[in-house]
Amino acid sequence: MTTALILTAFAVLILILFSGFFSGSETALTASSRARMHHLENAGNPRAKIVNRLMETRERLIGAILLGNNLVNILASALATSLFISLFGEAGVIYATLVMTALVVIFAEVLPKTYAILHADRVSLLVAPLVRLAVVAFAPVSVAIEAIVKWILKLLRADRPDDEELLTAHEELRGAIDLHHREGGVVKNDRDMLGGILDLKELDLSDIMVHRTKMATINIGEPADEIVKKAISSPYTRIPLWKDEPENIVGILHAKDLVRAIQKAQGKADGIDIAAIARKPWFVPDTTLVDDQLRAFLKKRAHFALVVDEYGEVQGLVTLEDILEEIVGDISDEHDIAVSGVRPQPDGSVIADGTVPVRDLNRCMDWELPDEEANTIAGLVIHEAQQIPEKGQTFTFYGFRFSIAGRQRNRLTSIRITPLRVRHGQRIGTRQAAE
């Protein structure tokens, strides 16, 4: 073999190494963690800063890498063909094709990309300075190619409209949390807490408020000693006071204010002016976003608000604790009344009170029942059945069987929910009529 042929073979091997470098760099830079690179840049890592600058112009980066990769691959194939023709004549074309296909696939594609995706952050930091040089060197050609591609896409009306919505930061975070949970990197409690924080921007107060039918209130017209007795026996520190009718809330009685008043009256409860110590109620619209209400609570340094509809009618109440429970789950203290609204059964079914929110049941049982059309389990059943079911009726939808276990007047008080078995990878009974 002559010196020229040896140099040609050596040049082919060098070009394959360059091809592997471009392929691995593309995979590493696109798969690297943006959050980690941002953290490293803030910590003063110069290579992480280069990576972030490259990713800010991703189209130009990909264009430069693909241009370099194709140049070295085509040149390597041309040199290999020339080499094999010199050795084997016209049959060298076939040999060159087979050998180059194997070399490129193994050493210039699969091997570097597999390593790069397994060590994306490390590789991206390592290759960033060299890739930046390639991007600068190929910049004129990359810009021209990018312009031609955009023009062709626009001509074919296949370009992305300016008003097309991409994934928001919240959606990306939610997807990352769910992905890590499925892979075992995030436990269920942490997933629920992180998801609860993201949900605050999507929920309004009507989704989390305590409904007026479950509010503990006191008639301000009762004797002062009766009000004191009820307030002391209540598990709550803030109690709405109503006058003439339960929906007419005129004040909020705080337990600390009541204690001070009792002390000032030397223990004589009947001498206390309840109206004088009651605080002014704070009314907020039921369409207020939970995230906005949390900020309002913090700004006003308040913990309690009454929720009203568009007509000004009281629909319920919301507290700072209610919002925090959307993040961390149920918060109970020594004065809370333990009411178990979800009771798992040995057969795998669950008996739930009709007033249990769908979101709470999903969080408790790790289910995915929809909560767009109804807040409570009873509301979901009524919405899907399009009627108020009778006790004993059974409905099947969303992969669950709902059996009405209790009803009082027009309210569903108890529902047995049974997950259906999985057949051929799908839940049966996506949505069926009453059985």
Image (spheres, rainbow, N blue to C red):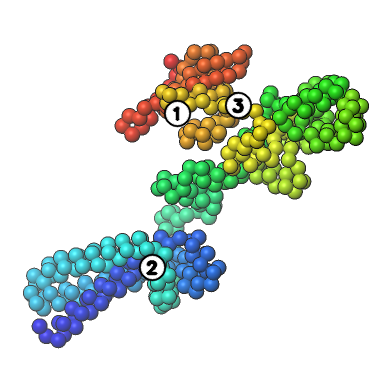
Using the rendered image of the protein, determine whether residue 248 is visible from the camera's viewpoint: no
Q: CA distance from mark 2 to mark 1?
A: 45 Å
Q: Residue at x 27, y 64 (%)?
A: 111
Q: CA distance from mark 3 to mark 1?
A: 27 Å
Q: Which residue is mark 3?
A: 339
Q: Which of the two discs, 2 and 1, sits closer to the camera?
A: 2
Task: Name the foreground residue: 379 vs 115.
Answer: 115
How crowded pointer 3 is (Cα within 10 Å; few <14, some 14-19, many 20+) is rated as few
Image x and y of residue 68, in percent: 34, 72
Image x and y of residue 67, in percent: 35, 70
Q: Which residue is mark 2?
A: 123
Q: Is residue 383 left or right of residue 210?
A: left
Considering only order in the chain, which callout, 3 or 2, is on the residue closer to the N terminus? 2
Q: Residue at x 53, y 31 (%)?
A: 361
Residue type pointed to by label 3: Val
Count of marks, rendered view:
3
Q: Which residue is mark 1?
A: 398
Image x and y of residue 168, in percent: 54, 51
The secondary element bearing badge 1 is classed as loop
